[in-house]
Image (cartoon, rainbow, N blue to C red):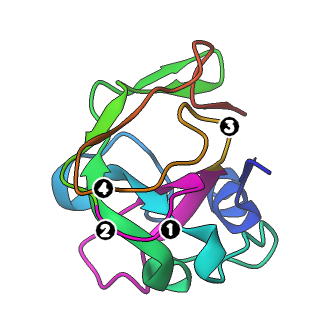
Amino acid sequence: MSGLYEKWKQNLLTAATDSDLDGTGSTGVYAALVDKDTGYTPNYTTDQFYSTVSANIVGTPVELSNKTFTNGVFDADDVVFSSVSGNSVEGVLIYRQNGGANTTWQLVAFIDDVTPSSVTPNTGDISVTWNASGIFKL
């Protein structure tokens, strides 16, 4: 089930460092393909950092481009993950990097209702199309 991580929402409400989503590069927002079958089940209450999910990432994460923030809706361009191999993909993780280690990269959202919803990588590209109404709404 898709959702927003509560630790990120808490940091957003308190204007904590590394909670905003308008950065780029080393402070950018990234999408990563996740294989839930290898043991990751999102815990939206307690999961906070990328390192919690890193063992279940498939392929190479992609920075989101052309991000928009309109009426509480976060959106960005659709993404293409290049040359993906691995067991399976059942969701997409959205997270925010910072200048530190991945043990400090904030988890934002887990999306499992994207197109395609599940795919078996075959070393080809995987394109993810976000919902027409945006990636998520606060």
Instruction: Based on the picture, tell me whether residue 94 belongs to the magenta stretch.
Output: yes
Q: Which residues are magenta?
A: 85-110
Residue 71's quadrant in the figure?
top right
- Rendered view: 66 above or below 6: above
Going by the numbered disc 4, the residue's amino acid type is: Asn
For residue 29, side relative to residue 47 (left or right): left
Q: Which residue is mark 4?
A: 122
Q: Tell me the residue at 57%/13% (across/down).
A: 132
Q: Which mark is residue 113?
A: 3
Going by the numbered disc 1, the residue's amino acid type is: Gln
Residue 51 lies, in percent from the top left, at 47, 84
Q: Say whether marks 2 and 3 touch (CB < 8 Å).
A: no
SS assignment at label 4: loop
Q: Say whether marks 2 and 4 touch (CB < 8 Å).
A: no
Q: CA distance from mark 2 to mark 1?
A: 8 Å
SS assignment at label 3: loop
